[in-house]
């Protein structure tokens, strides 16, 4: 999804409890929502994980992970190994949830506000500059 | 009486069987319909992470997801136009192979047609001068 | 190493010879003698020889895998089979430009040989203009794309050739295409020369016709080879994608086709002089535009060898200079050449040619605008749009119907004036066309009225062209090319409307069906070749008569550079191709299998060959009565 666009609602399934929920209901109560598409087989996602953990410390952000075309076992292993930066994780077995966001693949990160408006979009792994930029947005 | 109920049962079973097989057939038909429709749509979409390939032709992760996504949208009752426009909203005009008519593409469509008319006028003037 | 040096110095000598020829011919122009001095012929021969030596040196460097040469290092590998070492010579930017230069000097040599009865000044001026192009390209090659650049330290192994380019059809595609593409340079030079020497007349038309046909035949062949390659190598069964790089080869082809019809009119009736010259200039300019677009890296496609903006800017500047030059010459010499205007009757072959040109130029404008408009939009407004098949179909298909109808009746028009009679025979042809079109449309199950109209037009053209076989004076050139063209259109239409395909993710041992056929995935095998490893899928197809057809698609993993390609397995019959490809799915033991029926595929190739055959008839037809 290009920046400044608002996405419509769709259903998502939670990774651990496998409960179905409307995505709009997830976006509630915080100022900024960071949506990160990742997978255990994605190499750059490993490098990205400490950047995400750093952002987790910012309490104004809700960290949402979208686990892309992955197996549950591998995904959980990955989180154990590299740390779990997410408040909530949803699964995208077919890769179709990511299409809803307008994503190209993994990793990809979206910054969304409470009106479902996409503020920023990062294709590929986050770097230090991106983290700095995200922090600046949340502090405003 | 017994006979009758047995007969009835047979008819019932038959009806159920017909119903099921009919249903199965219509499910099968529907699924091939959506598959064909998906092919028609994906033939007109660019695989954004490939080099000059359509989504239909590509086997990349992105293209495969897109195919499933579109099939799902069709099954949810979305029309072709709705799917195209929502994808354009998400990924930009670059994703569709049909540029469509908009402020930006008006000249693209009009220019060749205009040239055709001008050419016709020049030729017409030349050959229809004396009849 | 030494051979590479030889190639380089040979290029330098070639450039020096070109400059020398340029001045030599300018001096001779002012002299009053009637013949060209033998020295000039010798120089032109030497110029070609120098480029030839250079070209052979590069081929030799590729054969012996001389990795002290940067071009060889970047594009070859010792494990490559000999054939692909050789074709690798022109499978890259530098080598392909050397090939450009070879053809550029070669056609000049050919022109000089074939024009011994032509006026001296016309020949000299053609040489002069051709030299401007040759010098421009010499400098381009030496400055930006020297194929003999050395690298130090010398490498022991090369980087390899892109695997999808390792293919027999693609091996000979560039030389054939370039003969057509670059062949247009001599048409351009001769057109300018004929204007200055006041020679735009019947004899000139006769002389330059050979080169127009020459370029046209090779360009057709080059496009055909490229299409065949795309069909079986790119792996999804398409043969034309309206990709910008295909478009840039189609554009000069279209303008050459228009020119071909014009030059015959000029030869016969001394008409359309101005327009013919304009077409000559446009044709070469389009070839240059194509080179610019491909070499500059503006286009995103498999043909983009290198993304170097300086190369693009050089070609663009050079193109602008040539266009301005020809424009200036056109303005200056316009009144001298094109004074008298002959009358044209409405019902005449002249009119038919004009209408032919009108439509072809329209198609050309569609392709041109469709190709470059997105580039401009991107540069000016920073907006990206894709212009793909829907655009071309919408703008071209509706115009194809009147076009083929005019094309059907055009050949039966007479020069100067025609009296039309509609007899019983023509009526029967129409009835037969209609019936056949209805049957075809019914057979492929297409309810669209527009498709029916297309078939009517295409079949009508076919029958009208075949009808010409019964005429007393047969013009085989026209009969074959027109028949070929109608067959091509019919095959493409049938192919696009009745292709069937199925995509399945299956394991070994499983099967699926398409129409009345059962496709069984028998087994999988791994084989090791010299430059790649291949995973071969063995498939059995049981057709409607329970006959077994074996298909063996492959996934090849090339070692240098490491790339995986999918090799289709195709069984061709007269009426349809069976086309199968396999792909590995990540992390799973399934294979993604795509099985297709592609009807009338082989007819697309055959009809294009028939079109070319028509061109060859035109070349070998000796000064007999010409009828187009």
Image (tube, coloured by chain):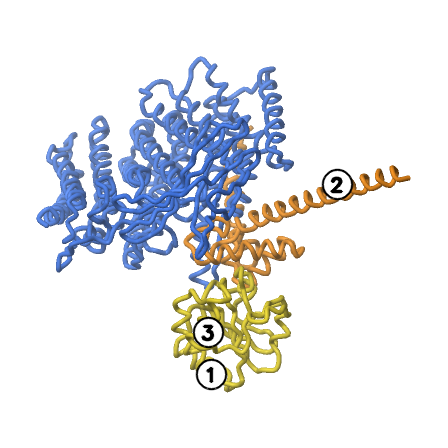
Chain colours: A yellow, B orange, C blue
Instruction: Kindly state the secondary structure of the residue where label 3 is placed.
Output: helix
Give how far across and how far down residue B128 sits, in percent.
54, 32
Q: Which mark is residue A119?
A: none
Give how far across and how far down residue A94 sits, in percent.
53, 59
Give how far across and how far down residue C473 sits, in percent.
42, 15
Q: Nearer the viewer, residue A26 or C288?
A: A26
Q: Nearer the viewer, residue C259 or C396?
A: C396
Q: Residues within 10 Å of mark 2 (few under 14, many from 20)?
A: few
Residue appearing at x 44%, y 77% in the figure: A83
Instruction: Kindly state the secondary structure of the residue where label 1 is placed.
Output: helix
Instruction: Spot the residue most to the front.
Output: B2
Dividing the image into 4 quarters, which one contains the C terminus of chain C? top left
Instruction: Spot the residue most to the right.
Output: B1
Instruction: Spot the residue most to the left.
Output: C2
Quarter where residue C209 is shown:
top left
Q: Is residue C523 left or right of residue C62?
A: right
* Count of marks placed on residues: 3
Residue appearing at x 23%, y 33% in the figure: C111
Q: Which mark is residue A135?
A: 1
Q: Is residue C203 above or below residue B83?
A: above
Q: Which mark is residue A79?
A: 3
Q: Which residue is mark 2?
A: B18
């Amino acid at each position: 999804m290009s920046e400044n666009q608002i996405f419509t609602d769709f259903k998502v399934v939670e990774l651990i409890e496998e409960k179905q929920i409307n995505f709009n209901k997830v976006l509630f109560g915080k100022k900024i929502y960071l949506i990160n598409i990742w997978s255990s087989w994605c190499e750059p996602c490993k490098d990205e994980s400490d950047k995400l953990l750093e952002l987790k410390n910012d309490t104004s952000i809700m960290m949402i992970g979208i686990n892309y075309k992955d197996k549950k076992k591998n995904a959980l292993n990955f989180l154990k190994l590299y740390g779990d930066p997410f408040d909530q994780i949803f699964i995208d077995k077919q890769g179709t949830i990511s299409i809803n966001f307008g994503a190209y693949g993994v990793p990809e990160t979206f910054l969304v506000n409470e009106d479902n408006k996409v503020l920023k979009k990062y294709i590929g792994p986050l770097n230090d500059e991106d983290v700095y930029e995200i922090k600046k947005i949340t502090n405003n | 009486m017994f006979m009758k109920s047995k007969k009835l049962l047979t008819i019932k079973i038959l009806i159920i069987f017909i119903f099921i097989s009919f249903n199965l057939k219509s499910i099968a038909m529907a699924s091939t319909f959506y598959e064909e429709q998906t092919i028609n749509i994906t033939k007109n979409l660019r695989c954004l992470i490939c080099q000059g390939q359509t989504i239909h032709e590509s086997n990349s992760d992105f293209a495969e997801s897109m195919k499933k996504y579109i099939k799902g949208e069709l099954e949810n009752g979305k029309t072709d136009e709705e799917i195209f426009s929502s994808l354009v909203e998400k990924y930009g005009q670059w994703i569709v192979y049909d540029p469509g008519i908009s402020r930006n593409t008006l000249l693209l469509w009009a220019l060749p047609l205009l040239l055709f008319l001008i050419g016709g006028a020049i030729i017409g003037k030349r050959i229809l001068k004396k009849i | 190493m030494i051979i590479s040096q030889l190639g380089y110095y040979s290029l330098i000598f070639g450039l020096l010879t070109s400059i020398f020829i340029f001045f030599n011919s300018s001096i001779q122009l002012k002299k009053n003698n009637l013949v060209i001095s033998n020295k000039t012929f010798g120089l032109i021969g030497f110029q070609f020889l120098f480029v030839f030596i250079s070209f052979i040196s590069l081929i030799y460097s590729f054969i012996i895998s001389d990795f002290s040469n940067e071009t060889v290092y970047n594009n070859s590998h010792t494990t490559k089979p000999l054939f692909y070492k050789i074709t690798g010579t022109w499978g890259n930017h530098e080598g392909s430009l050397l090939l450009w230069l070879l053809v550029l000097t070669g056609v000049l040599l050919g022109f000089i040989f074939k024009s011994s009865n032509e006026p001296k000044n016309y020949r000299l001026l053609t040489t002069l203009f051709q030299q401007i192009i040759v010098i421009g390209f010499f400098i381009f090659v030496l400055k930006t794309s020297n194929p003999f650049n050395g690298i130090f330290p010398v490498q022991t192994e090369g980087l390899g050739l892109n695997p999808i380019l390792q293919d027999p059809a693609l091996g000979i595609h560039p030389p054939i295409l370039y003969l057509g593409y670059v062949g247009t340079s001599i048409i351009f030079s001769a057109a300018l020369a004929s204007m200055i020497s006041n020679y735009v007349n019947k004899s000139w038309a006769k002389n330059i016709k050979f080169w127009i046909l020459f370029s046209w035949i090779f360009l057709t062949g080059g496009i055909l080879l490229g299409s065949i390659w795309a069909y079986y190598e790119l792996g999804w069964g398409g043969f034309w994608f309206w990709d910008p790089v295909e478009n840039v080869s189609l554009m000069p082809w279209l303008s050459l086709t228009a020119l071909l019809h014009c030059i015959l009119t000029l030869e016969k009736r001394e008409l359309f002089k101005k327009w013919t010259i304009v077409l000559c200039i446009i044709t070469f300019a389009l070839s240059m535009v194509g080179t610019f677009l491909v070499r500059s890296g503006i286009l995103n496609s498999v043909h983009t060898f290198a993304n170097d903006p300086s190369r693009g800017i050089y070609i663009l500047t050079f193109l602008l200079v040539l266009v301005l030059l020809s424009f200036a010459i056109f303005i200056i010499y316009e009144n001298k050449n094109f004074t008298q205007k002959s009358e044209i009757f409405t019902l005449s072959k002249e009119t038919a040619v004009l209408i032919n040109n009108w439509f072809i130029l329209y198609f050309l404008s569609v392709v041109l605008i469709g190709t470059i408009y997105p580039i401009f939009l991107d540069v000016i407004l920073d907006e990206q749009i894709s212009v793909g098949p829907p655009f071309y179909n919408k703008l071209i298909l509706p115009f194809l119907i009147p076009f083929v109808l005019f094309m059907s009746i055009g050949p039966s028009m007479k020069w100067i004036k025609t009296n039309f009679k509609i007899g019983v025979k023509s009526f029967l042809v129409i009835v037969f066309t209609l019936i056949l079109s209805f049957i075809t449309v019914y057979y492929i199950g297409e309810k669209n009225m527009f498709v029916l109209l297309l078939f009517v037009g295409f079949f009508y053209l076919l029958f009208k062209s075949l009808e010409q076989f019964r005429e007393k004076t047969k013009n085989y050139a026209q009969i074959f090319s027109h028949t070929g063209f109608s067959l091509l259109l019919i095959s493409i239409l049938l192919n696009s409307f009745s292709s069937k395909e199925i995509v399945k993710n299956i394991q070994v041992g499983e099967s699926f069906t398409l129409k009345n056929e059962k496709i069984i995935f028998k087994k999988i095998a791994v084989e090791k070749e010299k430059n790649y490893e291949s995973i071969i899928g063995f498939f059995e197809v049981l057709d409607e008569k329970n006959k077994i057809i074996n298909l063996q698609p492959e996934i090849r993993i090339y070692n240098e550079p490491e790339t995986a390609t999918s090799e289709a397995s195709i069984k061709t019959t007269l009426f349809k191709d069976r086309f199968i490809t396999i792909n590995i799915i990540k992390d799973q033991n399934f294979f993604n299998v795509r099985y297709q029926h592609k009807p009338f595929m082989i007819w697309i190739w055959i009809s294009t060959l028939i079109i070319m055959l028509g061109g060859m008839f035109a070349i070998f037809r000796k000064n007999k009565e010409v009828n187009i």
